[in-house]
Image (cartoon, rainbow, N blue to C red):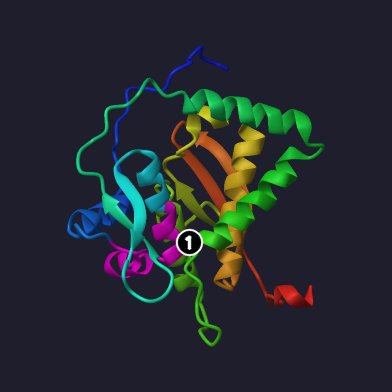
Amino acid sequence: MSERTVHDAAPAPAVGESRGRVLDVLRAAPEGAGVREIAEQTGLHSNTARFHLDILVKEGLAERGTGGHGRPGRPRTVYRAAPSPRVPAGRRSYRLLAQMLTGLVTEALPQPAQAAVGAGEAWGRYLADTPSPTQRVDTEEALRRLAQVLTDVSFAPGPVENRPGPVIPLHHCPFREIAADHRDLVCSLHLGLMRGALKEVRAPLDVDRLEPFVEPSLCLAHLTPVKQRRPDHDA
């Protein structure tokens, strides 16, 4: 590690805009709310809403339970805002864990960067707002959906620029400290995340490469057009 930081900074349940909207819905629903209901009220994709709910549960800001007792059928999973902030049992060391795991992946896999791209693509597909089978997604809509995925996972994407060639400026890396020591692995994960999201929405463009840290808080995602996407089952 570049810095001998063992413990994470003091917990700051600072939630981003999307996660904050999810928490607001929970606080307004004392009886609890399901994933679909939360997604509808926040405008998020169901998978993205579930992603934020899982994090809120882990951070002690929400609780997972069941609802619909006494009704026929299987009880549904509901989420509720935690009644009060929980006192942490001790200091957290997620940054150290991330350093250890990324180091393990780098040493254990023969092609860690390639594996990270694949894992990123899977998560990008999962978090993307999938269009209907008949919907044609143009470049503008594809970029909007990609920006939403990036924002939801705490990136700060800017509008497309020409530097030359179209690029998406990313002004914030949520894993910056880990990327400092494991750039190939972390940046490959982010590259795959963007590629997977664009594939899921059947976008007419792709991310050719990710240029990391051209400035201390700026990375550039270089875009390239896709002439024709073939369905995955034809590959």
Magenta stretch prevailing secondary structure: helix
Q: Residue furthest right?
A: 110
- Residue 136 image position (x, y, % from top left): 52, 83
Q: Which residue is mark 1?
A: 146
**Vertically, is 201 above or below 90?**
below
* Residue drawn at the location 79% of the way across and 40% of the way down: 111
* Residue depicted at 57% across the width and 53% down the height: 193
Q: Residue at x 29, y 62 (%)?
A: 33
Picture residue at 40% right of the left edge, 45% below the top: 55
Q: State the quadrant of the C terminus.
A: bottom right
Q: Is residue 147 visible?
A: no
Q: Is residue 108 left or right of residue 159?
A: right
Residue type at numbered disc 1: Leu
Residue closer to the observer: 191 or 45: 45
Give the quarter of the image for residue 11: top left
Q: Does residue 145 sit above or below 122 in this rendering?
A: below
Query: Which of 111 and 137 lies nearest the eye of the viewer?
Result: 111
Can I make out residue 204 in this image?
yes
Q: In the displayed structure, does residue 95 sit left or right of residue 199?
A: left
Q: Percent position (x, y) of residue 62?
A: 30, 47
Label 1 Cα neighbours within 10 Å, binned few <14 / some 14-19 / many ≥20: many
Q: Quadrant of the N terminus?
A: top right
186 vs 87, left or right, is right
Q: Position of residue 135 (x, y in %)?
A: 51, 84
Q: Residue furthest front?
A: 70
Give percent across and percent down for residue 49. 39, 59
**In this view, 163 is above or below 92:** below
Q: Secondary structure at mark 1?
A: helix
* 37 inside magenta stretch: yes
The magenta region covers 33-51
Residue 47 lies within the magenta run: yes
**Disc count in the image?**
1
